[in-house]
Image (cartoon, rainbow, N blue to C red):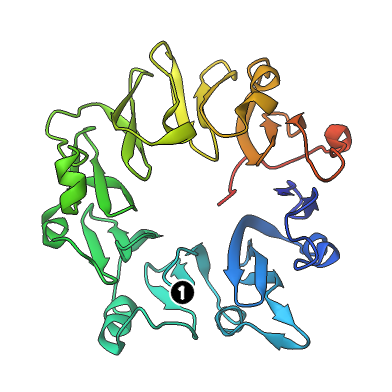
Amino acid sequence: MCVLKEDGTILVSVLSNSAKIPVAEVESMTDIIAIYYYASSFGPCVIGLRSDGTLSVAGGKDNGSIDLVIEGILNWTDIIDISVGNSNMIIGLRSNGTLLLSKGRVNNFTDSSIDDLLNWTDIIEISTGGNNGVLGLRSDGTVLVQPINHTYDISGIYGWTDIKKVIGANGRVYGIRNNGTVVAVGHRDAIGMGLVNVEDWTDVVSILNTNRSVIVLRADGTIFRVGNEPGSAGQIDFHDWTDIIHIALPGSLVGFKSDGTINITGGLYIDNYRRDVSQWTDIVAIRFRETAAYGIKSNGTVVFAGTNYPYNNPNVSSWTNIRTTNYR
């Protein structure tokens, strides 16, 4: 796991496939303001967004060769965000609201699709994932979409207005309006499960779009769920959760409370860390690595729970000045 320090450097705990990502190369990055992960053709790599709008990359190389997608981003400038979904490319959002596309492995796009993306303007947020293609939220609250092998009607998206957040994955796209209501489109399975019947949803703050369900946070700090997941992913219980200000699903469902404590439920390895995590305080971000959990506190220190099997548990007591945002 990588954590970002306030000075723009990165600390590395033991990484999965760490032989593929040179730790020294990651920790030599400087002036980083956001961290991303990408599965290149040569294995996993870490991408750092610098404060000057350029990108730094560790990994993505093998015996002197470099992944074509990674090579395509090294000269980008003026970047404020990137999307590393499963569209076989990396998409960069520039500060002027236009997009850049990496070269290589763009088999999911036609030439006309690429041209359309490069002609987008006034974009403030991008998203890729599933068979939804590329989603772009514009500054005027409208949404653009470039589909990838979509299997459902997405034309309704073009009529959306007053949108402040777009969430797309697993054959569904949700748009949260400024007034807390929601619009949605989805494939027929999602329609059959009621996952896009959003007419009655109000005061919505955020949405987690899982495989066969959707989890919704309301402004009053409560949560509701539509649909259900099979197996351990479906064994979550949040009926008594209150005062929640943020939700995340990085393995277990996590509810961040306004007092800095954590509610947690579900997940295959939750018994390894649930007791300790439930006693944490002053938490602003949380990361999971299978059987372990890392909590980042508002003062920039880190706490650890669980086991880092098959590696030794990290000594995080010396970690200080850790940045509390921008983990993508």
Residue bearing the label numbered 1: 88
Inspect this view and state whether residue 184 appears: no
Left or right, 189 with respect to 228, comes to left
Instruction: Indicate the position of residue 205 as horizontal and vertical percent values.
Output: 33, 32
- 291 vs 203, nearest the viewer: 291
Left or right, 301 with respect to 110, comes to right
- 162 vs 136, nearest the viewer: 136
Instruction: Indicate the position of residue 250 as horizontal and vertical percent values.
Output: 54, 40
Q: Residue at x 69, y 36 (%)?
A: 291
Inspect this view and state whether residue 110 appears: yes
Total labels: the figure holds 1
Q: Residue at x 62, y 67 (%)?
A: 52
Which image quadrant for residue 75? bottom right
Q: Residue furthest front?
A: 231
Q: What element does badge 1 sit on? A: loop
Q: Residue at x 75, y 68 (%)?
A: 20
- 136 vs 141, nearest the viewer: 136
- 31 vs 41, nearest the viewer: 41
Q: Residue at x 49, y 85 (%)?
A: 103
- Note whether 284 is above or below 28 in the view shown: above
- Disc 1 marks a residue whose amino acid type is Asn
Instruction: Indicate the position of residue 323 as horizontal and vertical percent values.
Output: 68, 42
- Note whether 241 is above or below 50 in the view shown: above
Left or right, 39 with respect to 135, comes to right
